[in-house]
Amino acid sequence: MSAQSYRPVVPIAPHDAVPQAITALSFDPTSDTLWSGANSGNVTAYYTPQGIRGVSFPVGGGLAANKVIADETQVRAQGVAGEGIGAWSKGGVNRWYYRPSASVTTFSSTLSSSRTVAVSTSTPEIVLLNSITGSVLRQASVPSTIRHLHFTHSYLLSGDSDGYLRCHDHRTGLRREGGAENTVKAHASEIQGLQSSGNHVYTIGWGLRQSRPVPDPLVKIYDLRSMRPLSPLPFPSGPAFINLLPMRSSSLVVTSNQGLVNIVDTSNPTSANEFYQLDTPAFISSAAVSPTGAYMAFGDSDGVIHIMTAANDDMPFNGYEGQPVEWADPPEPLPEIDWTDSTPLNSVGLPHYNTLLLSSWASQLESVKVSTAPMKIPLSVLSTIKTNDGIAYAPLPRELKGRRNMIAVAAPKDQGRFRSGKQSDASRQVEFVGVNDSPDEPPPRYRKVEIEYSRFGVEDFDFAFFNKTEFSGLETHILNSYTNSLLQVLHYCLPIRKVAKSHITTRCPSEHCLLCELGFVSRMLEDAKGTNCQSSNFCKTVGVLAQSVNAIELIDYGVDLAEMNYARMIQMFHRFLLDHLAVEEESYSDNPPLLPPDPSFPQYTATSPPITQLLGMFSRNTSICTYCKVMREKEQVTFVIDLIYSRKGMAGPESDLASIYKLRIFDSSRFVATPDLPPILAVNANVYSDEIFEYWLDTRKQRFLTPFVELYVQAGESEEPSFVTYNLRAMIIQVLNKDRRSHLVAIVKVPEAEHREDLLSPWFVFNDFSVQNISEEEALSFPGKWKVPAILYLERGDCQGQFDYSGLSDTIDPSILSQDTSISVHRDASLIKHEPLGPKELPCHESLVSIDAEFVLMQQEETEYRSDGTKKVLRPARLSLARVSVLRGDGKKIGVPFIDDHIHTSEIISLEDGDLEPHTSPYTLTPLKVVYKKLRLLVDSGCTFIGHGLSKDFRIINIYVPPERVIDTVDLYFLRERQRRLSLRFLSWFVLHENIQTDTHDSIEDARSALMLYTAYEDFEAQGILDEKLDELYREGRKHNWKPPPPLRTESASPPVPPPSQAASQPNALPIMRSSMTPAPFVPSGFQGGAFAGFQQSRSSSRSHWRSG
């Protein structure tokens, strides 16, 4: 088209009752249509220069439309609200909508060669989308927020809020630093417009004057090949919009907000320019040029679209007779209904809805509470009531003023389920349906569960409500408790469980051993049989070892952040754990083979530890020099396989799970024979992008994850290929909640649950302390993006049932109870209060022992105080075992301690006296793992434990003792109807007439008092006076406010304390002197003689300053 002057035509007036500013304009390249975006957030089509209104649709977000671009097949638009970017057909039907987590700032035109559209977000980052489907192709971070994006013939240009013009190569994935190939500072402040023609780039933007932004009066020009600046174009009015003029490739249309339009030839800017002034008093808010350059459109703040043309009156917007205009489908007429008494209501129909209707109220949400009767009318009202025409009325009494039509409402209660306030409906389940549930949100059984705390502590929390199975869960609110899911997976892999349990019976020299802690957790989970457990010792060891190697990314400090990626964290810890497990077993020379000699099974050397036999994959890596062609081979052992995915749409292997396994295991540089494939395959899923996650999502035809996978592998370099079958045993998934916070859940095929007909399947969900049985179909499905795979464990099919565990030890050496295990360098002999067991005193199934533990406070509890004065415990205080004392409960030396160990741990650093440091402690100092082994041996020997409040002690120690082998004095002296449990101090004062814990706690003193209380209980029962004593006990407790009264006179000094062995051999040892007003102590049967006398003399000995359990 030759250069012609433009003339205005009749503008397109607004059609809305309240005019909305036109914020975006775009001419359709294939039809006679002008697309406009309004301040209301709607995109509207105007057909022909006469402005016939067509389809209209919202862009989302409720704010103005920011940008509209029409191409051959669809219209793309984005709003100022930044909710997302979508594509619509020419008829207004949405085709796709991309909604990122951050706000969308702008998008580009389509790169015709690859059908790619670039989108920028406020993160800031660039996202490349498929313009046909809206799927994400690539993502890359950028230095600053982008305001304009534009594709040239070879590059992607971005105009940023910091005034920089950046040139990106989208073909390389924007991998350079900052994502840019070239960068130039175009304007002092934000770039306002961006266009390109050939090798030239044009920009307009904001400058600074006296530190205030003003429109830059220059149109900047740069050479795209080198980003070299060329002579700028002056525009004193301040450019607001720039557009290229088609058919005149070197011409540029520059428009100001005041309506001044300048068409300038950039190749010859000194030639005569064209100037036009729009006839409008309003502010110009958008501009566009038609594909042929015959029309220019300008939108103003009054909702008017001004059109200027250089063509004939009958020329369409696109310059030729293109595609026919798509009109919006007219609404279907409402059906006529002949209304009768029998016409069903559902014939009326319902409007479109996208949330659940109230009529879909789940049966689990129905309340069983019936409405109460109406309140009675007060007598003061009835006495003055008057009636007129059937209506009764009365004056409002003074005492009811301010309370009319009001009813007292109870304060809202915590939603936690506590055993102290159990509801009568015990059949309620964890699984319930809410009215806001949707397929895009995790089901209730997968959502994050939290422990809530009542005034009775964590022991009052009803864990049984969340777990009605015989398989135990693990508690949260512990540092590094994100490892709970991996612990469950390893526990239910039977060969790993056997090896870990065997390891705790060996003489492991390491103080911090993850394999030992794994064995302790496995024993605890086995014994608990559905009771909740705590893995604090394992989690603490993880923190110590991670800090020792500076792997701080593995430590969870308890800060629940939305950006915390637990899938990546657990996969890093997975590799860290298996490497440590293999190293920790290498110190033993006796490593029995776990599989029989068979050519098809993995064969290992005699020095291969059991963990390597189970998880290690031996391979030969081959490397060839590209110059001299020298080949080198190196053997290595791999414990974890990281999956690698081929890019969709590219030529390569199939996209099924078996091919992905094979692609990673048998790559071009590594040879793995069939016998070298491990019995257990540990896999990191490595799902870190939406493109990879599409592999795992369920489709209508099939699921990606299957219960077993067959690997078609080479048995040897010269042998025939063969199949190796792996069965899925367990997996760890990351669950994304509605607030984008994540947590980890284990889905396990429990071996003990296989072949059971009373279950849905052997698959269980272990969501920390919540455990539920699910179907296999649910376990293997990935219905939405809330379920992200992290770790998979597979067991080799031909190895199942072939393992030989006879070479593994299964019992702890009982002589550990007879050894002195102290590591204290400067131990004070006068402070040794225990006497180890002799060879003939080793515990058996009938043995009685009395136990008490003391703990140190490692971290204060986190408490939330509410406006009504109440408080809620968010996270309990963190305690660590500091001392444990175990006494003989029967025999000649009854009451004499045989364990009195102070615990050495590197985590405790705040004690001033150094009582838990090997070089300064005067006490018997023992590593925590050795103490745990002693207690583990007592439990395995079948001992019965006597103590006071033992459930909390055992929980913190991380050991489970069956209830039938625990005698707790807090339960012996308890009347359920009184609903109050009594302290050890008060019971000792009333029953034994002893004042204990007067200054500090002493675990030996507490354990011996509990033992004497138990013996006294048996005496009361034998005499038939137990009920009488309990009633008297509670009467005295109420009288003294449940605390022992202070003694009338201070007890006299005690003689020196003999060692326990001497005390036990002194039958005539004198008891402590007492006030004449203090009653003589009650001495239970079995305590007459030397042992009790020795206890009396040791009363005044030094006591530990730690807090008792």
Image (cartoon, rainbow, N blue to C red):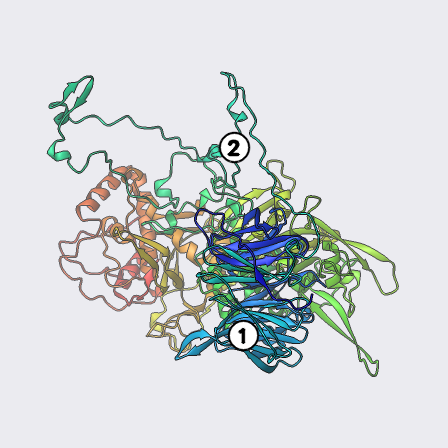
Whether residue 1064 is situated above or below residue 195 in the rendered picture: above
- The residue wearing badge 1 is 549
Q: Is mark 1 on a helix, strand or loop?
A: loop
| Alpha carbon distance from label 1 to label 2 | 64 Å
Quadrant of residue 423 within the rendered picture: top left
Whether residue 883 is situated above or below residue 375 in the rendered picture: below
Q: Out of 428 and 718, give the one closest to the viewer.
A: 428
Label number found at residue 72? none
Whether residue 223 is situated above or below residue 24 in the rendered picture: below
Q: Which amino acid, mark 2?
A: Leu
Left or right side of 464 for 403: left
Residue at 35 percent across and 59 percent down: it is: 862
Q: Out of 983 and 924, give the one closest to the viewer.
A: 983
- The residue wearing badge 2 is 350
Residue 1038: x, y in percent? 20, 45
Which mark is in front, 1 or 2? 2
Left or right side of 1097 for 297: right
Q: Which amino acid, mark 1?
A: Val
Q: Is mark 2 on a helix, strand or loop?
A: loop
Residue 227: x, y in percent? 62, 80
| Screen quadrant of the N terminus | bottom right
Residue 559: x, y in percent? 44, 62
Q: Out of 1017 and 719, give the one closest to the viewer.
A: 719
